[in-house]
Structures are given as structure tokens and as C-alpha cells.
Amino acid sequence: MFTVFLALSMVVGCQTVKNANNKQKGAVIGATGGALLGAILGNNVGSGDNSELGAVIGGVVGGTAGVLIGNRMDKQAKEIENQIPGAEVERVGDGIVINFDENSGVFFQTAQTSIVGESAELLAKLANVMNEYKDTNIIIAGHTDSVGAESSNLTLSKNRALAVENYLASRGISNSRFTTKWYGETNPKTTNETAEGRAKNRRVTLAIVPNEKMKQDAQKKAGQ
């Protein structure tokens, strides 16, 4: 199995967040929960037992409450970018999606699951931001490419997703905030026919979404 690098590499960069954020859009545009699920899982969002992820994600909050939530999530996305230079942060609906793949300093050694060295330092910075925003839930989904046995890939994606969860929990994040799933090779982000595609499919995806408390607080402030 190839060395797997876990990079905080996102589709939408800082400038995009600035120019097209939920604070500005409010309920006028806003992606659906299904779009967020697609960003977390990859191509095959209808496969497997994904219903519980959909329940955690929920729908996009509309109206003034949606504006307040969007403002808070935009701020958190900015802080992630500031703490981890070079990270691209994708804002989807009310959530923030981070794909850990082979393009930066957070990585796993070949066939290993330990988080050490620079990888631990970068995840510690991410945990610091998450600890500032306690009214959010964190979804972790592990994925692999299609190289090797399907059963081995499933186990590897599980162990790496759990390694990320355990490390973040060791930095003070409550276990009650996590929903952790693993999919092996079944939910590719892109093709497995090329080396570049396989590199993008060897990933752990992390999403940050508002919890019920944040939603209820926003609705109260908005008078909804």
C-alpha cells in the first residue's frame, strides 16, 4: 500500500469563502444536506448505511438564523485557514469539509495508522480551533483507493479514521461530538484508474456541522 498523506486540501479556498459565504447568502442560496453528504463521501453517496450521517448533518437552516449560523461557520473556516497555512477550506451549506489526502504535512506512513511528528502538530492546531467552537459536531469518514483486498482496505480506512478521532479527543474534544464511519474503497472521490486519482481517494474526510444547540440559539436570536 502506498504511503498515505493526509492533507488539509479543500476545493474552495480562502478567497472563495470570502466572496461566496453563507453569511452573505443566508437562506437565499445555501447547499442542501445532500450536497454536504456528497462532499463527505465522494461519488457513491447512495451506497452503504449513510442514513445516520444524513441525520447528523441535517438540513440547511434558513432565514435570519441561517445567516447567524453561516457567520459563525465562516469565522471558524477562516481560523482553520489561518492556523494551517495552505489549507483550502470548503464551505458546503452550514458545514465545513476538510479532505485529508496526499498533498500536505498531515500523513500516515505506509500501512500505518499512527499520527506522529508534524502530522500531530497540524492536527493539534485544528483541534484548538474546534475547541473554540464547542457547539458543533464532527463527522470523520475514512476512505482508501482500490489497490489491495477490499476487506483490508475497509479495515485500514476504519483504523485511520479512528486514529484521527482518538487524536482529536486526546486534545480535549468531547467524544460525544464525533460520528466516525469508514468505507474502504466503496466511495471513491474520483477515478482509481490513475495514480493521481488513487492518491485523492486515499483520504480521511472531516466535516464540521452545527449541533442542535447552535441551531436553537440562532433561532432564538433571530426570533424564529
Image (cartoon, rainbow, N blue to C red):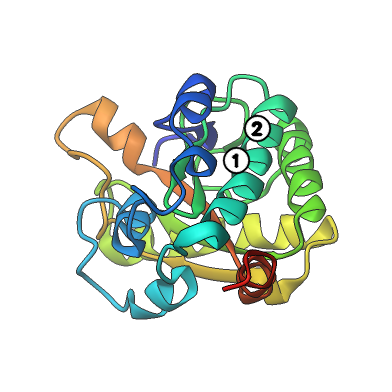
Q: Is residue 58 left or right of residue 167?
A: left
Disc number at residue 103?
Answer: none
Circle 1 packing at 10 Å, graded few (<14), some (14-19), many (20+), is many
Amino acid carrying mark 2 in the image: Lys
Q: Position of residue 38 (x, y in %)?
A: 30, 55
Amino acid carrying mark 1 in the image: Asp
Q: Position of residue 5 (x, y in %)?
A: 51, 33
Secondary structure under tag 1 reads helix
**Point 78% across, 62% down: residue:** 173
Circle 2 packing at 10 Å, graded few (<14), some (14-19), many (20+), is some
Secondary structure under tag 2 reads helix
Q: How many marks?
A: 2
Disc number at residue 74?
Answer: 1
Q: Is residue 176 left or right of residue 65?
A: right
Quarter occupied by the C terminus: bottom right
Q: Is residue 195 left or right of residue 68?
A: left
**Point 36% across, 63% down: residue:** 33
Residue nearer the viewer, 170 or 139: 139
In the figure, 90 relative to 97: above or below?
Answer: above
Residue nearer the viewer, 5 or 177: 177
Residue nearer the viewer, 136 or 164: 136
In the figure, 52 relative to 117: above or below?
Answer: below
**Point 66% across, 20% down: residue:** 85
Quarter occupied by the N terminus: top left
Question: Would you say the residues marked 1 and 2 are in contact, meaning their CB atoms lie under 8 Å apart?
Answer: yes
Q: CA distance from mark 1 to mark 2?
A: 6 Å
Which quadrant of the figure has residue 58? bottom left
**Point 22% across, 40% down: residue:** 190
Residue wearing tag 2: 78
Residue nearer the viewer, 72 or 85: 72
